[in-house]
Image: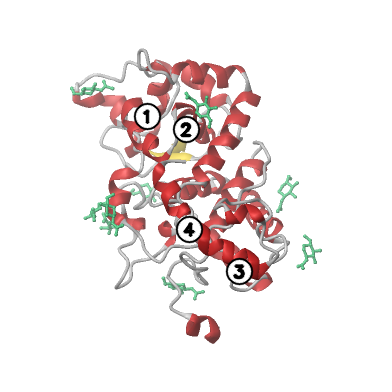
Amino acid sequence: MGSQSGSRVTGVVFMLCGLVLLGGGISSSVAYGQLNPTFYDETCPNLTSIVREIVGQVLNNTDPRIGASLIRLHFHDCFINGCDGSLLLDNSPDIQSEKEAVANNNSARGFDVVDDIKTAVENACPATVSCADIVTIAATESVTLSGGPTWSALLGRRDSRTANLSAANVSIPGPFETPDQLKAKFTPLGLNSTDLVSLSGAHTFGRAQCRTFSQRLFDFNQTGALDPTLDTTYLEQLRQICPQNGNGSVLTNLEPTTPDGFDNNYFSNLQDLKGLLQSDQELFSTPEADTIEIVNAFSASQQAFFDSFVESMIKMGNISPLIGTLGEIRLNCSRVSRTGAYVAAM
Ligand SMILES: *[C@@H]1O[C@H](CO)[C@@H](O)[C@H](O)[C@H]1NC(C)=O
Ligand SMILES: *[C@@H]1O[C@H](CO)[C@@H](O)[C@H](O)[C@H]1NC(C)=O
Ligand SMILES: *[C@@H]1O[C@H](CO)[C@@H](O)[C@H](O)[C@H]1NC(C)=O
Ligand SMILES: *[C@@H]1O[C@H](CO)[C@@H](O)[C@H](O)[C@H]1NC(C)=O
Ligand SMILES: *[C@@H]1O[C@H](CO)[C@@H](O)[C@H](O)[C@H]1NC(C)=O
Ligand SMILES: *[C@@H]1O[C@H](CO)[C@@H](O)[C@H](O)[C@H]1NC(C)=O
Ligand SMILES: *[C@@H]1O[C@H](CO)[C@@H](O)[C@H](O)[C@H]1NC(C)=O
Ligand SMILES: *[C@@H]1O[C@H](CO)[C@@H](O)[C@H](O)[C@H]1NC(C)=O
Ligand SMILES: *[C@@H]1O[C@H](CO)[C@@H](O)[C@H](O)[C@H]1NC(C)=O
């Protein structure tokens, strides 16, 4: 990981060594500041199946978009001070909520599902599992339930007691950005061009609002012309959905071939100039970009995409975790817990 996360982790190693001696049961990998897949095996053995069940019910019964929305929550959480649940905090006298950042306001969603999972997890294992880990598992299970790869999320994160709205305003990748602009946001977090392309592959499912791409259809980059990197048939279809000066909140599929499936069609669509967002299409269409050959490799092999996606999700999930005694285990994901007195009162 980047030096940022490295230094934060190093700072608690000695403290954690003490905990390992006292606790006895804590996995030795924790002593080196790492997350691990067995973190809750003793304290909340059914955690993953509880999360999978709730996400599966929502996906099946009420909201086929929720998998994509939950991955986006994890992503937008991890990019701001690491994966610490900061995005889940509501406004309060001490918190300026990241939910109101440009990239989140009226688009980040799934908070109600996270709350439902948290309630079920608190019933099974009170005051044990962080909201940051719940979001991580929900994102992981969403991929598997939608036809993507299966892996065990690394766990042991704790929740922040702060949020950073100004960082959220400037650090989350945006839909109009070029590969170089995107890389400038990924690189400081220890994520390289392979991670950029594989994580962009999460746009294999979910929906996007017209406002995130409609300038491509009418007045691209304020040139008065159309986006030359957009297939003309697809462009006409999109104009039907998103007419000029129409409702910018109307939704369309991010990946038109298999809208709710997690697969590698996103990449073949980019090769066919059918990437919905400018930031997607430019991974393939920007001359000389080092992302082009990665798009081609993932289009040629779904397995290569899946393997890389899992690795990149784990790398992203490792950004600056709060571990040991840092942060806290929130009881309500939307607000910081106060003190031990609050826990005792529950
Ligand atoms: C764990 O979940 C299984 C089914 O998923 C259930 O049979 C079992 O009772 C649960 N165990 C606990 C301790 O809740
Ligand atoms: C969702 O639907 C699939 C396919 O029909 C089924 O196998 C699975 O058990 C369902 N999951 C839930 C949680 O209802
Ligand atoms: C967020 O969206 C709400 C509802 O549209 C709006 O009232 C509010 O002003 C927005 N907040 C910011 C910071 O833009
Ligand atoms: C963040 O962006 C919102 C617009 O979504 C703006 O209203 C707010 O003032 C910005 N806040 C900070 C701290 O940058
Ligand atoms: C919030 O993020 C901004 C910009 O990334 C940074 O300058 C500032 O120090 C952060 N504030 C806190 C309290 O961490
Ligand atoms: C990105 O990092 C991964 C290891 O995490 C490595 O396998 C991959 O080759 C790197 N990609 C680039 C373009 O350097
Ligand atoms: C958009 O316009 C700006 C300024 O003219 C230019 O620097 C940039 O390369 C253009 N972007 C694309 C994708 O054409
Ligand atoms: C715009 O579209 C959204 C999403 O379909 C809808 O909820 C909203 O009511 C529409 N607004 C107007 C003014 O039609
Ligand atoms: C969690 O906290 C929020 C305040 O951010 C509050 O609106 C909500 O009712 C709380 N949920 C529960 C279950 O107490």
- Using the image as rendered, state which of residue 260 and residue 305 is in the foreground: 305
User: How many other residues sit within 10 Å of disc 3, few (<14), some (14-19) or many (≥20)?
Assistant: some
Between marks 4 and 2 in the image, the one whose residue lies nearer the viewer? 4
Q: Which residue is mark 1?
A: 279
User: How many other residues sit within 10 Å of disc 1, few (<14), some (14-19) or many (≥20)?
Assistant: many
Q: Are marks 4 and 2 in contact (CB under 8 Å)?
A: no
Question: In the visual, does 295 lie left or right of 239?
Answer: right
Residue at image position (50%, 69%) is 330
Mark 3 or mark 1: name the one nearer the start of the chain.
Answer: 3
Residue at image position (47%, 53%) is 9
Q: Are marks 4 and 1 in contact (CB under 8 Å)?
A: no
Question: In the visual, does 71 lie left or right of 219?
Answer: right
Mark 4 or mark 2: name the one nearer the start of the chain.
Answer: 2
| Residue type indicated by callout 2 | Ser
Q: Which residue is mark 4?
A: 322
| Residue type indicated by callout 3 | Thr
Real-space CA distance between mark 1 and mark 2, rounded to the nearest whole angstrom? 9 Å
- Using the image as rendered, state which of residue 336 and residue 17 is in the foreground: 17
Mark 1 or mark 2: name the one nearer the start of the chain.
Answer: 2
Name the element at disc 1.
helix
Snapshot quadrant of residue 41: bottom right
Residue 71 in view (yes/no): yes
Real-space CA distance between mark 3 and mark 2, rounded to the nearest whole angstrom? 32 Å
Q: Which residue is mark 3?
A: 128
Mark 3 or mark 4: name the one nearer the start of the chain.
Answer: 3
Q: Are marks 3 and 1 in contact (CB under 8 Å)?
A: no
Between marks 3 and 4 in the image, the one whose residue lies nearer the viewer? 4
Real-space CA distance between mark 4 and mark 1, rounded to the nearest whole angstrom? 31 Å
